[in-house]
Each structure stands twice: as C-alpha cells, then as structure tokens.
Amino acid sequence: MTGAARIEVDHLTRTYGTTLAVDDVSFHVGAGEVVGFLGPNGAGKSTLMKVLCTWLPPTSGTIRVAGHDVRREPLEVRRVLGYLPEHNALYEGMRVDRFLRFMGRMRGLSGKLLDERLDWVVQAAGLAPVLAKRVDQCSKGYRQRVGLGAALIHDPPVIVLDEPTHGLDALQVVAFREFVRELAPGRAILFSSHVLGEVLTISERVLVINAGRLLADRAVSGLHEQARSEARAVEDVVLDIVRSGGGFATGPQTRDAPDAPDAPDAPGSPEALGATESATEPSS
Amino acid sequence: MSEAGAGAGPPVAVVGRGAGFFTAVRLVAGRELGACFDGKIAYVSTIAFVVLANSIFMNEFFLTGTIDMAGYFELMPLLLPFFLPAVTMRLWAEERKTRTLELLMTLPVRPAATVLGKFIAALGLYALFLLGSTPIVAMLFSLGEPDPGLILAGYLGLAFLGTFLLALGTFLSSLVADQIVAFVAAAVLGSAFVLLGNDSVVAVLDGLFPTRGLGTWMLEHVSVRPHFDAFVRGVVPLSGVTWLLGGSAVFLWLTATTLKRHRD
C-alpha cells in the first residue's frame, strides 16, 4: 500500500523552443514509494525533474508536489522538496560544514534544530571526514554526498534525485541503496538513472522514458515475472520497452540552448542506456 | 498505471519552512561577501581602486592646494564605471556558469531576497572602496577647515551613484554566463550614463541632431552627471535622489525578472 500521492504529474509537456523534451507524460508517486526513472541520456529525465523542482516551468500540463501546484505555489513546492540536480553544482569555495549550514538556514532551520539536522546529514551521508574541507577539495563521490546532504537537510517528504549515484563507487552505491530504503517510509522518492541494474535494485517501480515519452510505468516485481515467464533476462525486457519507444534517444532531444539539461549521446548507441554499467568512479 | 508500491509509513513533516525574506537577504549577502574575499577579487579591486583614486587626488591636491574633496568626487564618475563592474560581474554570471543558480533558485526563498542579498554584498564591497578615502578626509581636517557639509554631500552623491552603477552591473550580470561579457557591458553602459553628461559629447550630439537637441535631451534625461554634480556642489537634490534610486530599483527588478524567466 502506498500513501496519498505526493508527486502528481498529469499530461506534462515541456519544450525548448521547437524541440519537444517531455511529451505528454503522466504518473503519480505515493508516500512510501521509491520510483526509478530510467532512460537513455537525453530521454527527458532531467528536464522533467527540473520542472518538478520549479526550476523550469511546464509548457503544458500540471504537476502537484505534496498537493502544491508547481506553477501557482512554487515556494510551497520548494519547501517540501529535497532536490539533487543532475550536475550537483555546489559552492566550490565554501567549506562543507559551512555550505550545509548555509543550506539549512536558507531552508529556515536554526538553533538546535539546525544542529540536529546537520548531525543527521553528516552521519547519514558519511561526511565527517570532509566537513572541514572546501567543496572543491572533495572527491567526486564526496561532492555527490554533500549534494545529497544539502537536499535532505530539511527532512523533506518528497525527494527528487537526478542521477544520485553518479560518481559513487560500487560500495557507496550499495550504501546509497540501503540509505534510500531507510528513507522511504512516509516519503515519496523519485530518482533517475541511466543504469538499468541500479534502478531495478533500488526501486520498487520503474518509469521508462525515451524521446520525451513515458513508455512504461511498471513494478519491478512485474518486470521480473515477465522475464521469468519469457525465460529472458529482466534487462532484455526493459531494453525491449525502450526499443519499442523508438530505440535509444532517437527523439528530437537536440537543442542549442546553453543549459541543455539532456544532451543525448549518439543516437542508436547502446551505451546510452547502461544495462549492466555500475557507477564505479573511485572516491577518496 | 503502477503495479505495486511500498509501505507508506508515517507521514513525514518537513522541518524547514524556508528562511524569511530578510534572513535570506542576510544569508545570501554573507555568503557572497565571503566568496568575494575567498576569491581575492575583493582585495585586488579594493586596493587597486584606493591606490589609484587616492594617488590621482593627491597629485591634484599638491598642485591646487585647496582644502576640499571636490577633486576626489569629480574623479569618481570616471573611475566607478570601470571598477564597479569588477564587483558585479561575478554576482550572477558565475552562478549561471557553475550552475549553482539552479541550486539557489530552487530554495524556498523569493528571488527578490537573493537579488537583494547579492546587491547588498556588492554595496558592502563598494563601502570598502569609499572607506579607503578616509585618510584624505583626516588629512584635510588636520591641514585646515574644509566644509564638512560639502564633504558629506559628496559622499552621499557617491553612495547614490554607486548604487545606480552597481544595480546596472547586477542586471547585466544576470543576463549572461560569462563574467568578462558582464564586465565589458557594465563598463560600457556605465560610462555611457556618465559621458552623456560630458559637455563635448552633448555638443557633438546636438550638432548631429540639431533639430531635436539630442545631446541636451540625453544630458537632462539619461545622464547621471547632472544629478551627481549637484551633490558635489553641496546640494542634495530630491530629483537626483529619486532618479538614481529609482533607476537602481528598476535594474534590480529587471534582475529578479530575468532570473525568474531566463532559465533555459
């Protein structure tokens, strides 16, 4: 059983000029759900997440986060949302502890509550070794954890993570998986990845998107059942779904805007969706 | 569409409601000032400005020997359009380039608060520029009896002129991701606002468009010089205060509007 829907996306379309990045996508994520957003690079995942977090306005359709409309109540949406952007841009010159404190204060935390939340974030994300370091002195893995800590500092009921395991080594990915499961009760968690194995392991439900279109909204258990019944690997089932939607990023996700959130890999390239790829970048 | 879900668990209540407007302004200003001093831009620009402005004034002071600061104040419209863009160029252009703009603008605070916070940080740095002239004031009072009202009015004029040019630079920085472009645009436009009040520029423009009196019209309606020059003469004109502060408010509003709309 899932709780009331925390993320409600209804007929969302988002264009960049004449380029269609997200095409009439609808789905809901309830409290207690961990939903993986799967698609090749350039599929539209990041664009959709940017609209969810109020960074980009929807071209048409509606999105409600914890009951708040992203267009009409952006501040309310930002209050309840913990968001880790794709590029995880951080203030490079700040010390990690000061950065987290800054983010907490901007979230309205202060005093004992801020200290408690900082302690929790430092412990949960394993940031103790780098607290006194500047962000630009941290490894990629730690930077990712700092971004995650900043996204969770206010204990948000809705969490949106864009490629959260990018830069984490294999052990950190396992730890992240456990961490997400611990976080899940009472929260709606939507995370994106182009690594198939990762999404199948972490989430209970998978949204497959390609060329801006939502191709499938399936329970992971259902995908496994289908794979068993067809005597195939579950990865092949998902890849078939992606291919049925036009293959690998064959849609029109090309644009000249400088802040292109979803620059596609070479169309047709199987590397665009890593079936067994693991994020194995070492970190200190 | 979904086939399954997980245990919902108890509802989670968010612990932060977002910083209040003025708290956010203070936090952003503090972070921005810290970043300026971390990046050494504050030290370099302040030292360069103070050394240049004070040495030019002292040179003129020894030549004329008058106990007043008019020479210093008259110098400022020529220096500020080039030094203040060094302060404002990074304010938003850097946020765009490093993509931290997305981080900042998805926090639960109003864009106006972040704009004001960064602007106040820039004002703080500008205050350091002006603090560098206090030895001149001390020297003048130790050598003679300068008119304190004239000096006060001059500083007031500098405060308003600086506010206007900083607001212009802030707006231009919000339009681009390249700090150099932001700097050049602010220096060129800031200089234009000053030079349109220059007698020779007015004469040339009037000569080019004699029927419309373009130069005179620009002097009266666009240039900051008539407003600032009144302060240097010891007058605090309400129209000048309104013009400079109103212009600053317009540029800051344009900055907030740009940040809300110009995201993709």
Image (cartoon, helix red, strand yellow):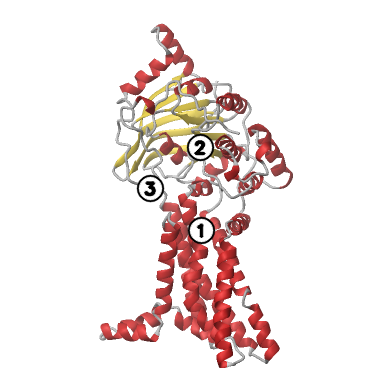
Q: Amino acid at mark 1?
A: Leu
The CA span between labels 3 and 2 is 28 Å
Circle 3 SS class: loop
Q: Residue at x 43, y 54 (%)?
A: B177
Identity of the residue furthest to the right in this view: A112
Q: Is residue A205 above or below residue A191?
A: above
Q: Are marks 3 and 2 in contact (CB under 8 Å)?
A: no
Q: Which residue is mark 1?
A: B91
Q: Position of residue B119 (x, y in %)?
A: 54, 63
Q: Which residue is mark 3?
A: A258
Choose between A127 and A75: the one closer to the eye. A127
Chain for mark 1?
Answer: B
Q: Which residue is mark 2?
A: A65
Answer whether residue A252 is visible to the viewer in this image.
Answer: yes
Choose between A161 and B22: the one closer to the eye. A161
Q: Residue at x 61, y 69 (%)?
A: B128
Q: Is residue B231 above or below residue A126?
A: below
Chain for mark 2?
Answer: A
Dots 1 and 2 on the same chain: no
Q: Earlier in the sequence, mark 3 or mark 2?
A: 2
